[in-house]
Image (tube, coloured by chain):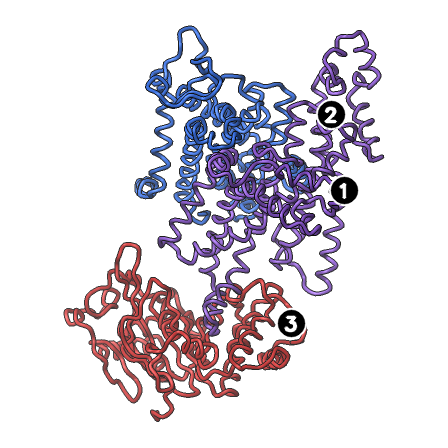
Chain colours: A blue, B purple, C red
């Protein structure tokens, strides 16, 4: 047992990309935790709202008081730092809830098979035939803006992926000898699922979940970018990018002048997603090198 | 996409053809059911809005809302009937080919959709082809140079690409290539080209600007359209390319270890033939599975990309409709999208059965 | 044996592998033997003894993490180790052919079996598709596949295990090679099918006057098919000789162990005899005789590599104590009877 853990830890950390992934993720976690110290909010105000710091509508370049510059009249640095918390909050909640839902549905479909499987898979197909972004957009637009509504929308349209994955794995595992042995011994179905099936099929789901963290945050940001989602001035990377969008469309090199309005929030997003992808890769290498992409 | 199960075998020859035809028929029969399901979901989402909100899409100016006619209007349009009744009404109209009036498109919904569809199709095609071709080529290359420099660089490229949100990339493209270099402007066409296309002398065959331009013999319009396509295509392609690269690479690495590759070598075949004929064909199988997903990703991506690059198309139409709560457009748009996706997936599934003869079509 | 009839002469072949930890694994360590025209020679031993690696080295199909570090492989008056890849490709499938253990995974699943055999024919025999197809049908008839025209259009997964193996044999023999290497050809097949395949191979060998290197751990097939037997252990040859000599007069403790561990129906056995111990890890071969840790006759002499000793005509053994061992086993056999 000890050597197994030893092997896992060794594998996790000897890999260059894994190290980068974990370090990056660590940095983000630190930033999220220490946000109030890094970018102190004004007294009495909601810390998630980016402070308005200027009256001019065009973006201001980085300066000592505003290290990342100003866009949409708000401090970009503040937005990026607190946006880290937003990203984690949205990402974790949506990932966890949608994965749990998906696990539940997928397990039933996979384990009981036949009619259950057919029906549940058709429903899954239907949900999947609607482009995620479109569906989330429509639902969020209908439910009203606000991050909570966005999270609900993403959860409702995000459970299908873990569901299909676990269903596929269960279908494979179901035919394995040890399951038949358990059945022959008279073990109750739900116990078989919990004790035998899930432990063997859960790892790809975990890996997928870590990858989805990244794409979910992207989608949430896309929704904010489109104006649906976080309210005006909320610390959200997508909202920050929305501010920069209009300036990017101005020709004659204007956009490059305002590079900071895009680069800083953009870089934060890319690095955040990258870290989750690398961590997911590292987990995959450890738990099942056969799945290696 | 209906998951293909590989438990049984696909017979060859005439038998196989019959099985294939039955499979297609069965899938096609399923389409209305799926669309029905989609429409139910979207309609029930819209049903959550109050009649007042939904009325707003029929009214062009806010002033009219203030008049006492509001309740009259609501009952006139049947907005306070029970939801199932409203759905039934919508469905009946649908069967007659009437999808309602599009507020954002200022035209009947169906017409608005059909008009914009070719633009999105064009964008998707111009992206899908490079993604598959370049992605698989890079993936094979990466696998063949396993663990050497080329492999590592390609993999870094792939991981970073997969992490880059498409709209951020689009913004960067605009920032660098358009704003600074003036190379790839947003929109579908420059003003002068637009004028030509809209004129009566320009015949529209497919609705896709590039093809139509060629068919009309206007090379200048063609090139202009291409210039406007580069930015969005780059943005759409980049992320999916990374994914295809990774899938191809891992699949190729796996196949290269297989026994039949060794047999092929033992027969005396040249290494190039071993790779290109024996290994690749097997390696492409998982890629085919994934390409269905890629199509979905592409179509979903057009929503954002068309919005960023200010292009006309199905994606931006839907985005606008969602933002404005134009529910007729939303219903029609989502259904249309759904139909295209389902057909696309079906085509992919069929080609998958052709590539891998072991597949059971179920 | 007339040396004019030698078609393959392997001298001091060494094949080493290198693993991720940088260790050198001596999979094949200095072996030499000859193969004569039209005869079947069996390479026998447990998994990991180096017999498959030897055959792959012959074809120069060793994986990239292995290297042929020394020796000569003389085939038809040229040293295969000095040929270019292109020249080797000419030989593979045409002069030397190979069939593998698992026909299910050794055949490409996405092409019909007909396509795969026609590919081999058009490659080496320089004929058009039509003619190649005719020859493919003939080959199928030769290996006993019924309804060959129809079978050509089928995919590997549509054929039974025995049929697949016949198909593989057809493919391998389609260009009438001088030498066929059969690596565990029947191991993955049902017992009744095994017998059929062996009979088929024997008859084909006679018809085509082909030499066969039969690689196996199953002494039963060896008894049926092979003229000479080479016993390998841990990368080295430990005994070689004619079939009769090996079965009746084994001299190496490993050979004796192998023979004795075959379950027998004709005498009463309370326990199956097995050779105590395990095959040593290739990265940690014992010094001297590699079998010594499992041998009850071991002494200090065994710390040196045993030399090749001539027991009788064509019968050689590599053991210090072979005389004693041989005597002991004969006595033991007498007791058992």
Which is nearer the eye, A270 or B48? A270
Q: What element carries label 3?
A: helix
Q: Nearest the camera: B10 or A258?
A: A258
For the point 21% across and 64% down, the residue is C286
Q: Pick the residue in front: B75 or B222.
A: B222
Circle 1 chain: B
State the image coordinates of residue A280 (x, y, percent, origin top left): 43, 38
Please give the label number shown on residue C151. 3
- Dot 2 alpha-carbon crowd within 10 angstroms: few under 14, some 14 to 19, many 20 or more: many
Q: How many labels does the image show?
A: 3
Q: Is residue A152 visible?
A: yes
> On what subunit does the disc labeled 2 rest?
B
In this picture, residue B27 sits left or right of residue B97: left
Q: Compared with residue B54, is residue A274 higher up or lower down, i.e. above or below?
A: below
Tell me the quarter of the picture where residue C297 sits: bottom left
Q: Which residue is drawn at 64% across and 68% down?
A: C154
Secondary structure beneath label 2: loop
Q: Distance between the residues labelled 1 and 2?
A: 27 Å
Image quadrant of residue B319? top right
**What crowding class fits label 1: few (fewer than 14 Cα within 10 Å), some (14-19), or many (20 or more)?**
few
Chain hosting mark 3: C
Task: Tell me the residue that label 1 is attached to.
Answer: B200
Secondary structure of the residue carrying tag 1 is loop
Determine which residue is flagged by label 2: B103
Crowding around mark 3 (Cα neighbors within 10 Å: few <14, some 14 to 19, many 20+) is many
Q: Are marks 3 and 1 on the same chain?
A: no
Q: Is residue C126 above or below residue B195?
A: below
Tell me residue B284's x, y (percent).
54, 55
């Amino acid at each position: 047992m000890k050597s197994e853990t030893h092997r896992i830890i060794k594998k996790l950390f000897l890999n260059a990309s894994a190290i980068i992934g974990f370090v990056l993720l660590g940095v983000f976690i630190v930033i999220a935790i220490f946000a109030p110290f890094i970018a102190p909010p004004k007294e009495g105000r909601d810390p998630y709202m980016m402070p308005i710091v200027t009256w001019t509508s065009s973006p201001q370049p980085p300066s000592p008081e505003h290290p990342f510059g100003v866009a949409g009249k708000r401090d970009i640095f503040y937005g990026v730092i607190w946006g880290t918390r937003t990203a984690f909050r949205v990402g974790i909640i949506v990932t966890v809830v949608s994965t749990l839902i998906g696990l539940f549905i997928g397990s039933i479909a996979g384990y009981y098979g036949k009619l259950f499987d057919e029906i549940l898979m058709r429903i899954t197909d239907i949900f999947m035939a609607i482009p995620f972004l479109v569906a989330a957009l429509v639902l969020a637009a209908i439910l009203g803006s606000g991050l909570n509504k966005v999270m609900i929308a993403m959860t409702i349209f995000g459970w299908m992926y873990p569901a299909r994955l676990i269903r596929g794995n269960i279908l494979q595992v179901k035919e394995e000898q040890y399951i038949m042995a358990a059945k022959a011994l008279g073990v109750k179905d739900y116990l078989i699922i919990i004790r035998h099936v899930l432990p063997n099929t859960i790892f790809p789901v975990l890996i997928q979940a870590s990858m989805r963290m990244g794409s979910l945050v992207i989608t949430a940001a896309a929704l904010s970018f489109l104006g649906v989602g976080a309210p005006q001035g909320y610390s959200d990377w997508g909202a920050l990018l929305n501010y920069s969008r209009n300036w990017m469309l101005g020709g004659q090199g204007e956009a490059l002048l305002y590079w900071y309005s895009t680069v800083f929030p953009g870089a934060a997003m890319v690095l955040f997603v990258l870290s989750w992808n690398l961590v997911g890769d590292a987990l995959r290498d450890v738990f099942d090198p056969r799945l290696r992409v | 996409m209906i998951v293909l199960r590989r438990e049984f075998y696909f017979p060859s020859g005439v038998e196989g053809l019959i099985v294939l035809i039955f499979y297609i028929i069965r899938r096609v029969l399923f389409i209305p059911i799926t669309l029905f399901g989609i429409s139910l979901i979207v309609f029930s989402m819209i049903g959550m809005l109050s009649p007042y909100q939904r009325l707003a899409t029929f009214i062009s100016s806010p002033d009219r809302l203030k008049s006492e006619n509001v309740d009259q209007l609501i009952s006139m349009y049947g907005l306070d009937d029970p939801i199932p009744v409203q759905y039934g009404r919508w469905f009946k109209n649908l069967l007659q080919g009437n999808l309602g009036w599009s507020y954002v498109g200022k035209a009947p919904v169906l017409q608005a959709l059909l008009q914009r569809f070719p633009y999105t199709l064009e964008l998707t095609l111009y992206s899908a082809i490079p993604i598959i071709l370049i992605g698989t080529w890079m993936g094979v290359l990466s696998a063949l140079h396993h663990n050497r420099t080329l492999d590592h660089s390609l993999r870094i490229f792939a991981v970073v690409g997969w992490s880059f949100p498409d709209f951020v990339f689009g913004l960067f493209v605009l920032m660098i290539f358009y704003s600074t270099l003036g190379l790839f402007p947003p929109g579908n066409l420059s003003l002068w080209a637009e004028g030509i296309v809209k004129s009566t002398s320009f015949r529209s065959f497919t609705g896709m600007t590039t093809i139509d331009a060629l068919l009309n013999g206007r090379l200048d319009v063609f090139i202009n359209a291409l210039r406007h396509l580069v930015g969005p295509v780059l943005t759409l392609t980049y992320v999916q390319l990374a994914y295809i690269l990774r899938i191809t690479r891992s699949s190729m690495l796996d196949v290269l270890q297989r026994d039949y590759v060794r047999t092929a070598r033992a027969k005396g075949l040249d290494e190039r033939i071993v790779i290109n004929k024996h290994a690749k064909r097997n390696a492409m199988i998982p890629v085919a599975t994934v390409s269905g997903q890629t199509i979905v990703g592409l179509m979903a991506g057009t929503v954002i990309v068309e919005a960023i690059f200010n292009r006309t198309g199905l994606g931006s139409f839907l985005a606008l409709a969602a933002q404005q709560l134009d529910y007729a457009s939303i219903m029609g748009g989502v259904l249309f999208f759904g139909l295209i996706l389902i057909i696309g997936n079906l085509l992919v599934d069929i080609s998958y059965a052709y590539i891998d003869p072991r597949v059971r079509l179920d | 044996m007339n040396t004019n009839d030698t078609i393959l002469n392997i001298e001091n072949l060494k094949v080493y592998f290198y693993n991720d930890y940088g260790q050198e694994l001596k999979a094949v360590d200095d072996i030499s033997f000859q193969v004569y025209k039209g005869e079947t020679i069996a390479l026998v031993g447990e998994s990991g003894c180096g017999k498959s690696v030897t055959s792959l080295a012959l074809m120069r199909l060793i994986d990239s993490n292995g290297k042929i570090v020394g020796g000569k492989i003389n085939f038809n008056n040229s040293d295969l180790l000095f040929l270019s890849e292109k020249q080797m490709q000419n030989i593979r499938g045409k002069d030397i052919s190979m069939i593998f253990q698992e026909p299910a995974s050794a055949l490409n699943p996405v092409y019909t079996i007909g396509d795969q055999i026609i590919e081999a024919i058009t490659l080496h025999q320089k004929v058009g598709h039509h003619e190649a197809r005719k020859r493919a049908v003939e080959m199928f008839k030769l290996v006993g596949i019924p309804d060959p025209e129809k079978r050509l259009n089928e995919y590997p997964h549509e054929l039974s295990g025995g049929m697949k193996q016949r198909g593989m044999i057809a493919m391998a023999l389609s260009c009438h090679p001088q030498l066929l290497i059969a690596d565990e050809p029947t191991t993955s097949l049902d017992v009744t099918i095994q017998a059929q395949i062996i009979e088929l191979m024997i008859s084909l060998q006679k018809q085509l006057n082909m030499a066969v290197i039969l690689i196996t751990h199953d002494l039963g097939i060896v008894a049926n098919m092979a003229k000479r037997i080479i016993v390998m252990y841990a990368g080295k040859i430990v005994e070689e000789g004619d079939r009769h000599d090996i079965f009746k007069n084994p001299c190496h403790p490993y050979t004796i162990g192998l023979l004795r561990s075959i379950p027998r129906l004709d005498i009463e056995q309370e326990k199956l005899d097995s050779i105590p111990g395990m095959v040593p890890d290739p990265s940690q071969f014992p010094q001297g005789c590699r079998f010594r840790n499992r041998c009850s006759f071991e002494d200090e002499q065994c710390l040196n590599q045993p030399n090749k000793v001539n027991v009788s005509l064509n019968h050689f053994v590599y053991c210090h104590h072979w005389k004693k061992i041989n005597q002991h086993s004969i006595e033991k056999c007498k007791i058992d009877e």
